[in-house]
Amino acid sequence: MLLARAMLDELRRNAAALHDLPRGRAPGGMADIVRERLERQALLDEKPLQIATARSRWRGLAYAAIVLLTVSVGYVLVTAAA
């Protein structure tokens, strides 16, 4: 309990420190640079879709692991109580 409270206090101090930092501005042509890069990716077909597909595969595997772990723990608890 004390460790959790100390961690929470530290997180609050960090949040306050981040809040007090000055806000910077992006360089003037930043929006144009980002737009050009996105257009170039779309025109050259650098396949950003494959990255999203790979991420979704890992996400699906993570969901399956969560379901398997939940069912396993539930089974162990039910059989231990019986």
Image (cartoon, helix red, strand yellow):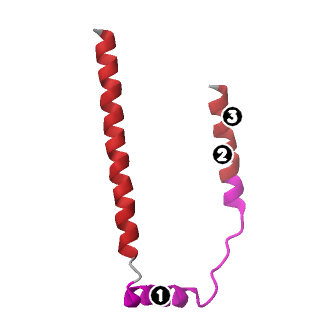
- Residue at image mark 2: 12
Name the residue that disc number 1 marks: 35
- Mark 2 is on which residue type? Arg
Q: CA distance from mark 1 to mark 3?
A: 44 Å
- Quadrant that contains the C terminus: top left
Which residue occupies the foreground of this view, 33 or 11?
A: 33
Disc on the earlier residue, 2 or 3: 3
Tag 2 and tag 3, C-beta contact below 8 Å: no
Q: Residues within 10 Å of mark 3 (few under 14, many from 20)?
A: few
Q: Residue at x 35, y 73 (%)?
A: 49
Q: Which residue is mark 3?
A: 6
Q: Label 3 amino acid?
A: Ala
Give the main secondary structure, helix, strand or loop, of the magenta stretch. Answer: helix
Q: Quadrant of residue 33?
A: bottom right
| 74 drawn magenta | no
On screen, residue 24 above or below 74: below
Residue 41, relative to residue 6: is it above or below? Answer: below
Q: Residue at x 65, y 45 (%)?
A: 11
Could you classify mark 1 by the number of other residues whose Cα lies within 10 Å: few (under 14), some (14-19), or many (20 or more)?
Answer: few
> Going by the picture, which residue comes out furthest to the top?
82
Which comes before the other along the chain, label 2 or label 1? Answer: 2
